[in-house]
Amino acid sequence: MVIEMIAAIANEYFPAVQYDQLRWDSITTAWPTGLVTGGYDSHHVQLPLREILPVAQVPGLSSSSDQASYPDGWNHYLPHLQSQVNSGAQSPGTDIFLYGWPDQADDTICGWGSSEQHTRRVRKEFAGLLKTYQVETLNDAGCGDVAWMSMIDLQGVDYVGYDLYERANWAELRQRGYQLNILDITANESRPADLLICRDVFIHLPNDMILPALERFRRSASLLLTTSYTSDSRTRQGEFSNFHRMNEPSLRHAKLDLTLPPFNLGQPLVRIPEDAPNKYLGLWNMSRLPTGP
């Protein structure tokens, strides 16, 4: 009965994936996750149990007040990013994952941060990093239209780009040899890789989505290159805080310092400065990342 409920509700609210074809594992009963897990082709999918059963029936969760016991930064019952975008209740914050910023730059729909002009230093240092760390397999989570990545010589590198939705130029890019797949990093794992880059994605997501994504990255890649900010006096005075960033996906850039709680990634191996104050791409050894609670 529970399996039928899962399939019916999932197909209604998550049309992007054929959940009726999932091979569901046993329902997770361990608190605090409360997640139902299943496999679909090569992907691993997790569905919050609270979206399927009444609160009183969720093991370990007797009332909404129990959510107060979550570790800082975690909320396992926040819907995944793709389910929020698919829900029909789009907002400017979720629209960016569908449409990007088509009016910001002439050479990309992904905003000025992905333009040729604003990625010159990033491209140069990233190309050097690929050689230094002898990267043979590269995952690009949040690749968009591959605007700046397509300017880098990836000869000898097995590249796969991932994004939440198909982009208009993907068919042409595939003809040129690019591997591009749809993936929700807040719900599913990417293939194993030497390096995973996730640039300018976390700044638009709440911690509730970032922390599980980091755990999935830890399981699928050896190195992580992602966007972070260096804390300064304004950070310490509370102008922005890792713990008070946003409650849902947002258009605005919500800064985060991945070296500090609740992320606690430690100091990066490498910092590639970005064309914005205190912003950089940090390289972390995934074997040193903390596991989820």
Image: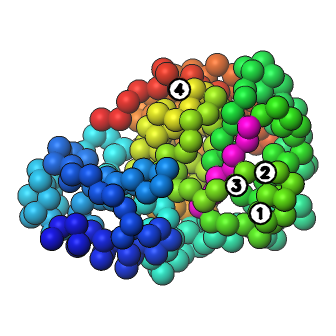
Q: Disc 4 marks which residue?
A: 286
Residue 113 seen from this side? no
From the viewer's perspective, tell me whether residue 243 is left or right of residue 281. left
Foreground residue among 135 and 141: 135
The answer to whether residue 42 is magenta is no
Residue 126 position, x and y percent, is: 79, 32
Residues packed near mark 3 inside 10 Å, few (<14), some (14 to 19) or many (20 plus): many
Residue 48: assigned label: none
Q: Disc 2 marks which residue?
A: 178
Q: Disc 3 marks which residue?
A: 180
The answer to whether residue 163 is magenta is yes
Residue 189 position, x and y percent, is: 49, 46
Instruction: Tell me the residue at 15%/65% (across/down).
Output: 55
Amino acid, disc 2: Tyr
Under circle 4, the secondary element is helix
Residue contact between numbered discs 2 and 1, judged by CB atoms under 8 Å: yes
Amino acid, disc 3: Leu
Under circle 3, the secondary element is strand
Q: Which residues are magenta?
A: 158-164
Q: Disc 1 marks which residue?
A: 170
Instruction: Tell me the residue at 52%/56% (across/down).
Output: 184
